[in-house]
Image (cartoon, rainbow, N blue to C red):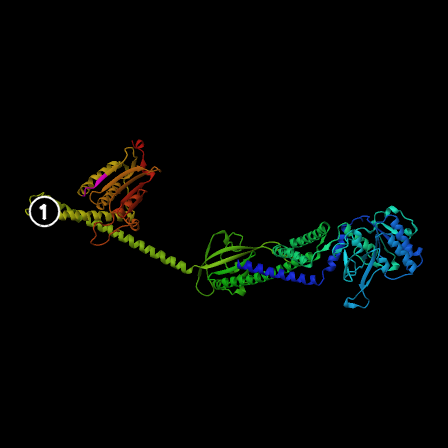
Amino acid sequence: MLTKLVAALRTLLLIGLAFFIVAGPFFWGAFKPFDSALLDLQYRLFQSHATGDLVVVTIDPKSIEAIDSWPWQRTVHAEVLNRLVAAGAKQVAFDIDFSSRSTTENDAVLGAAIHDADGRVVLPVFKQHRLGAGESGELAYSAPIAPFQRDAKMGVVTIQPDTDGRIWHSRTADEWRGWTIPTIAGLLSGHGRDKEQIFLIDYGVRTATVPTLSYIDVLRGDFDPSIVAGRNVLIGASAVELGDRHATPLHADLPGVMIQALAFESLVQHHAAREAPQAWVLMIAGAIAIPLGFWFARVSWRRGIAATIIVGATILAASMIINRTTGLYIAAATPIIGTFVAYLVAVLHTIDLQTLRIFNDQIEAAQRRALMKSVVESSFDGIVIAEQDGKVTMINPMASTMLSIAAGEALGRDIRTIMTGIAGVYEDPLGIGAVPLCETVLHPAEGDAVAVEITVATAAIEPMRHPLERRRETRQVFIYTLHDVTERRRAEEAQRLASEAAMAASRAKTEFLATMSHELRTPLNAVIGFSEIIKEEMLGPVGQTKYRDYAKDIHGSGTHLLEVINDILSVSRIELGEMKLNEAEIDLTHIVNSTLRLIGPHANEKSIEIDMQIPAELATLYGDERSVRQMLQNILSNAVKFTAENGRIAVSAMEDAQGGIVVAVRDTGIGIDAENIARVTQPFFQVDGRLDRRFEGTGLGLSIVKGMMELHGGTIDIESALGEGTTVTLRFPASRAVPQMAAA
């Protein structure tokens, strides 16, 4: 988030800099030529006809030639004025200087003509900079002589060229000796009473469509009176020799009288455009360029330049449309240049960022290469890189040590001459890729043999997308990793020998237990037998009651010891794999009943209730009857032993979903904690291993059950919780279930 904010602020700073770059030249007028060119283009695109409400009477070369003197007698002007008034002219304006006196007779004739025009005459007043005034700005004023002013209206005809020497603007009124006097264009168009207003002259009005009469033709009466009837008339010089010509847009130059006519047409046709303030233009340029600058910074240069052209054309079109529809002229050059500068700054900014990014990428790539080189060279594994033809292009120090060859000697050599004795059918030079892992023993010239695992990986190096890249095919290299497994092999060998020794010791122990159990049973049977004869007084009375009691104790202890020896012998036979199953079809109900009768007395002593639930249609179990009986006896004996008085034991049998037989013994005894459940089937394990433990036993019962179930291909499951009882489940596979019909 912080990075994006910094980038945005940086972009904003650059755009702000671009804005000031544009603002400075703008206020200095540097963009004025561009605006002039665009306005000139507008005049060329939007041309119109004159309204015909103004007729220009020109003092043209034809008139000067006909009246061979200059200045003309004022009686000539009086005659022309009389003819125009007689033809019905609405107003007659002169763009001729009458500020100096002529002869009394001539002035009187013209004055009488002005008087007879009854207020329809407009005479010019002038103001202009005095020659040599320089920057002082001193102005010279001139006006018609006083007799002419009494019966005529005054109109300013001053024309001020712009900085490029061309006439762009006119006014509706102008200041003259402290008074605000309408211009001739303002008076004739009806805008003379407007406040002083500067406007752009619409040079799009075709000058050829302005009705024009030659001065000499009017003087001679050689014109159609309907042309001037009800219309305004403007009289002025158009001949080059009179010098009243000025440079203008669209045209090379125009006579002053025609410029006045176009100013009139601009006002009448409502095309007199007012220029927007400079602050407006700069704000518009900023409003367009600043958002675009952010956008330019996020797009490609192609989209940016296309957008710049489109936006520039849009600005120009909008400026023209606003000018024609509202009379407001917004200089388009500054927003267009501002857009271009914003694009240029964004491109330079992007190039700068790209340069920085490329530099960072190069630094990162160099660091990554240095890191990879360091990792490869410091690796504990040997690494060799070869081309597809087998030539070695890189070998790290560990590989050099393993192969007993210097890196300088290995480079450029065929890898098959360095790593001999390895062959395959795969496409890599050594053919290792055909197998997941290749193990071999390297015999360096110096030192001991090294057992290694060799793996191979491939890397495809695509051609660069660069005009200078000459390679067109993908380059494939092979990376061989040599992992030293000498110590691992030694450890594995040591582990194998230790495992074999442990297995031999375990087998010796088991065989010893089996042998000792067998050897102990013979004398123990004699002890039990003779103690039973004495206990039962089979050969006559013993005589002393104490002797009979001792015989009972000897018989009981011997019987218990025999059971322990039998259990040890069973465990030993299972571990040695010497126990064989005498398999047959077994009536499970009968075995359960007989086992319950055997442990019944012990259960009755503790008032334990035993419940049996075995369905009559249960399949017959195929297995070893003695083993099944012993398993049930061991489980039920534990249930009685660990169940308190007045407890309950439930024995059930059923078929599971897979067709196997499931026998479950559930008691309400003391239970087993979760951490010891998995250990109770281990030989000699006692949950309570103390010497003064409450319950006696060798811890072999469930171990024997587990071994016998595994011989039957089944499993034993134990579920228990402290204080909630225990459930022991024997699961015989479906292969040992014989349906009753098949059994019959």
Is 608 one of the magenta-colored residues?
yes
- The residue carrying mark 1 is 548
Q: Is residue 499 left or right of residue 302?
A: left
**In what quadrant of the picture does the C terminus appear?**
top left
Q: Amino acid at mark 1?
A: Arg
- In the rendered structure, the answer to whether residue 347 lies left or right of residue 729 reads right
Give the magenta-colored segment's residue range: 606-610
Closer to the camera in the image, 452 or 157: 157
> Residue 225: percent from the left, percent from the top?
88, 47
Q: Position of residue 215 (x, y in %)?
A: 89, 53
State the image quarter where residue 63 is shown: bottom right
Q: Secondary structure at mark 1?
A: helix
How far across and down, in percent of the image, does residue 610 sit?
Answer: 22, 39
- 10 Å neighbourhood of mark 1: few (<14), some, or many (≥20)? many
Give yes or no for residue 504 being in the magenta stretch: no
Image position of 694 (left or right of 505): left
